[in-house]
Image (tube, rainbow, N blue to C red):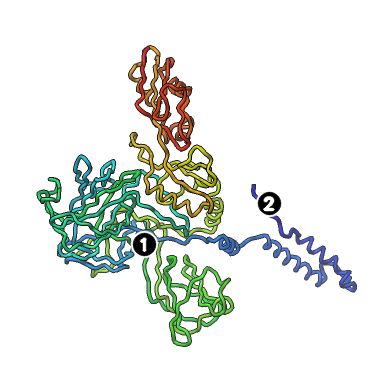
Amino acid sequence: MSLPIPKLDDKTFAELFQEARSLIPRHAPEWTDHNLSDPGITLIDLFAWLSEMQIYNLDRLTDENFLKFLKLLGTRPQPATAARAEVSFSFGENAPDFIFLPRGTQLAALDALAGRELIFETEEDLKLLHIELKQLLTRDASRWIDNTESNSLDNVFYFAFGETAEPGDQFYLGFDAFAALAGESIKVTINLYEVDLPQPAVPAEGESFTLTPPAELAWEYWNGSVWASLDVNDGASALAHNGRIEFSAPADLAKAGAAQPGAGLPTLVTEPLYWIRATLLKTGYEISPRIDTILFNTIAASHGVTFTDERHSGSGLPFQALELRHSPVLWNTLELEILEPDSQWRAWSEVADFDASGPEDRHYRLDLSAGVIRFGDGIHGRVPSGGEENIRVARYRAGGGEIGNIQANILNKFTDPLIAGVKATNRKPAAGGSEAETLEGAKQRARRDLKTRYRAVTSKDYETLTLSTPGVRITRAQALPLYHPQFPAIPFPGAVTVVVVPYILPDRPDQLPAPGEGLLKTVADYLDSRKLLTANLHVIGPEFVQVIVQAAVEIHPRMSLESVRLNVLDALKAFLDPLKGGPEKTGWPFGRPVFKSEIYQVIEGVEGVSCVSSVVLSSDSCIPGRENVKIPRVALVYSGAHSVTVKR
């Protein structure tokens, strides 16, 4: 329950008027006419009314007050953001060997609802190379798989290293032209299929974290005689996240076909190509990499238009305000310069307010939504000198908002008619565009932020922070104070062990949710900067104890023996599931024994079961035939090969 908000002053107009009139005999005894017709009484009446208005405003907070409060909390309303889209370029007919597209190249998409074109600009330079990714192959322990067609289809994924991703599995990329590109920077964009996966946590504003790759890859290229090592800048974390790999085209890269000696390529290769490959040396994937698309000649473009060298004239007066010709302005894109009396252009800096600005500080405020620049008064913030076009907005971008979240395959028109022989499209919808946050939204976010855990002190803190580790998907976490993995039998002062259970695909019933070393390292690094200095932190995966049930069951007449037997097996597997089992069906509790009485109850709850004649529990951590199965504190159970005998 929130505290009641006190009224700073609750006097009414009548009370103020009566109090002021009662003071007349003390301070002006010669004033004897206290009727409303007296001019002095009229003035008292007026000032009582004005005082009541001041008291009313005293109990009210303006938007400026709330902005100051948010500043004290280290935040402010979030500005509008620009939508981003990955744009793929390809050559048209009669195109040259390469085309250079500078940063800021504009493309247009038709917004059918608004009936206008939305402009996007590329975020980096791109040297468009006349290369095509012709074939993609996967080689696992038992077979070769051609993924070329799957890569060209939308919302169809394929496994880069097969469904299990074992060490030694390989992923091949074949290009049709490389010979004339020695030394050129080759950039390959990798998009994973994550539609059916929960979104991983994202870092908080201003928060940094380190993401450890879950696997180790060796990149190689075929040089005509052997597979040689290829130095790759891996921005996709070993194919665990969306990103881009970049490498320089080797000078000795050579073509290879299915009959090339030593290359080891299968008959699936239909033509000689230039090949690079990734070999899985060490695996720790919780989910084997599923590729949605691999694209070449692809860069990001964001919604907005860049404007340069916009001139305004200074008045030389305090509190001058300038309205830009285009708005809304995207945050952190405006560069402002002012010509000063010494004939030098000097850069000015944007500030949130003028509270800390001195008379000589070159500061300005910017209203992003309205596109208005405001200067100081000479006491808080310097006053720009007067002059004709002496204020230069060197650069700024206007745009952003939800309208930029366009559909796929509509960002395909260049605004520059001189760009010919190039095709462009966005194979995926643009995302990330948002409107400017309202003050009320910022207040709500600040309240949530105050309740968010950022420090690990209690066990609940450790568990909450583990589940919110950015960049990874974690289903369950258990913090065990005074527990050391190497000394599990004794309380260990200062030790804190966090057991992590990762998310796995639900259609993999035989896969246990065991975390890889990369995920454990990522969680440990994230918690390490948030724990107490004296805490001895350990991040581990759970142990898994296999439980096998041998049961004899009698069923009701007219029930199918095989149907009841299968239903009993399904009930046992569901109850002993590490992620969805247990008495609460929320996952088996860490370290909780399996009681024989519960197994009786589970089997008796199956439709058609008349009675349970006998139950025998066994596991890989106890002696068969005992009443219950005890497991370690960091362990979960899973089903083994149960045996159910059914009779009428």
| Residue visible at 9% across and 49% down in the picture | 259
Q: Nearer the viewer, residue 621 or 606?
A: 621
Kindly indicate the quadrant of the structure image that contains residue 446: bottom right
Q: Residues within 10 Å of mark 2 (few under 14, many from 20)?
A: few
Q: Nearer the viewer, residue 347 or 288?
A: 288
| Residue visible at 39% across and 56% down in the picture | 432
Tag 2: amino acid: Pro
Q: Is residue 522 visible?
A: yes
Kindly indicate the quadrant of the structure image that contains residue 185: bottom left
Disc 2 or 1, which lies upstream in sequence?
Answer: 2
Q: Is residue 334 left or right of residue 425?
A: right
Q: CA distance from mark 2 to mark 1?
A: 46 Å
Q: Tag count in the figure? A: 2
Residue wearing tag 1:
303
| Residue visible at 48% across and 55% down in the picture | 529
Quarter of the picture containing the C terminus is top left
Kindly indicate the quadrant of the structure image that contains residue 637: top left
Q: Residues within 10 Å of mark 1 (few under 14, many from 20)?
A: many
Residue wearing tag 2:
4
Q: Is residue 131 left or right of residue 370?
A: left
Residue 298 lies, in percent from the top left, at 27, 59
Tag 1: amino acid: His
